[in-house]
Amino acid sequence: MEEEQISGSINSFSDRSNYNSSHDTNPNNYYYDEEEESSSSHNHRSKRSKHAPILEEEDRISALPDSILLSILCFLPINGAIKTGVLSKRWASLWTFLPSLSFDSGSFEYLDDFTSAVDNTLLLHRAHKLTNFDIQFEYDYDTVLNPRLDLWVRVATNARVEKLSLHLWSPDCLDLDRYQLPQHLYANEYVSEFNFSCCKILPNGLPHWSSLKRLCIGYSALSEDVIRKVLMGGPRLESLELLQFWGLYRLDIVSESLRKLVVDSYVQHMFESEERKLELEIVAPKIECLEILGCFYTNRCWIKDVSALVEAKLDFDMRMEEEGALEEFQDIVRDILESVHHVKKLTVGSSCLKALSIMTVKHLSSPLSKCKCLTIASMGECDFPNILSLLQSSPYVETLVLDITSWGCMWSAVCFSWTYFPTVISKNNEGLILIITSFF
């Protein structure tokens, strides 16, 4: 019964153009009448009191074109944009033409209030084209909402949305009973960016994503078959990001268009034995940028072929509770560094840097790198000595970027450059440029 009511409401959304044509609800008509009134009134005043001082201040913001005002409203939360309707007749229905709609359940105390707000907003919304549609549940998504979400997605796709994001966080993000993307979503020629979290991705056949350039999938089960279909169905796909995923053991990237691959946290599913150590193999001979981030727990990552790689970022770690885990992590970091030794830009995180320092203690040299720009990401005070071994194995470095995490590290960075750099530069890296950055 509830689904029928929702369906009726959303169907009326698609019929609203007929309603608008028979009722004078077009904001543009209001703007036009208002301007005419203002113009005639102004002429009358000027004749009556030509030299009188102007006491009224002009509302310059309201005088801006709709396109600019709508761009401004897009920076506001949706409820804030709707509230601007009380400002004046000029603003009354302006928000209904917003090209971007973003809904977050965290802004509401009760889930029912949130879903009703989305329903009502979509019912009143009148833009025929959407650039962005974003639904985010803050750990309170329930599968009973699946039919409703299907209708919201249908509204977005009917409006030829360009960027679609569904973040359906639930109390158990690894639960198998979750929202499955509707099959019509796999045949879309308008979307250029998809962002999915906690969704089932199971296309029946090859997707038809002729405009898709960026795809981000998080907290989802994946398989080689799904990745193969996605890559074959997205001929213009340039960036693929996989976050907190499981079920996939080999990433074979055969796409001609894909240039960037991000692998962030390879997890073990609840039904898989914790004693079994998983391995993820990456074969991507044509990508230019690779990022390996997050936590791999006890799982291992192998890089087999990234021959066209230009830029790499290694900022991941593993669980170190088990005996021998630290040595295993050191071997993994070393193997990956050897696989990406030819890149021009290399970013190394704090955990990977510590693994390299262990090799120094064991009198093992770091793999020789040909990078010209080396960045140390999210580093702390204890990381400064570990940079030396990495620099010594990177004789072609021209720029060193230290991305520090606190003001305390700033002074350490300065002292480090004064103390160690003259020695390192004279031996290996003549003309080295040091850049210190911070984001705190």
Image (cartoon, helix red, strand yellow):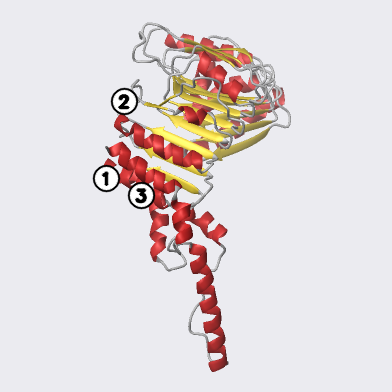
Q: Is residue 82 above or below residue 202?
A: below
Q: Is residue 231 above or below residue 76?
A: above
In the rendered structure, which disc, 2 or 3, sits on the residue that comes first in sequence? 3
Residue 369 location in percent, x, y?
Answer: 66, 18
Pick whichever, 386 or 76, lies toward us: 76
The residue tagged with tag 1: helix, strand or loop? loop
Q: Can the viewer see residue 388 in this picture?
A: no
Of circles 2 and 3, the one toward us is: 3
Q: Quadrant of the N terminus?
A: top left
> Label 1 belongs to which residue?
109
In the rendered structure, which disc, 3 or 1, sits on the residue that comes first in sequence? 1
Q: Quadrant of residue 403?
A: top right
The residue tagged with tag 3: helix, strand or loop? helix
Amino acid type for the residue under numbered disc 2:
Asp
Amino acid type for the residue under numbered disc 1:
Glu
Disc on res. 120 = 3
Label 3: how many Cα within 10 Å (few below 14, some 14–19, many 20+): few
Instruction: Tell me the CA gap for discs 2 and 3.
Output: 29 Å
Residue drawn at 52 percent across, 20 percent down: 352
> Label 2 belongs to which residue?
172
Amino acid type for the residue under numbered disc 3:
Asn
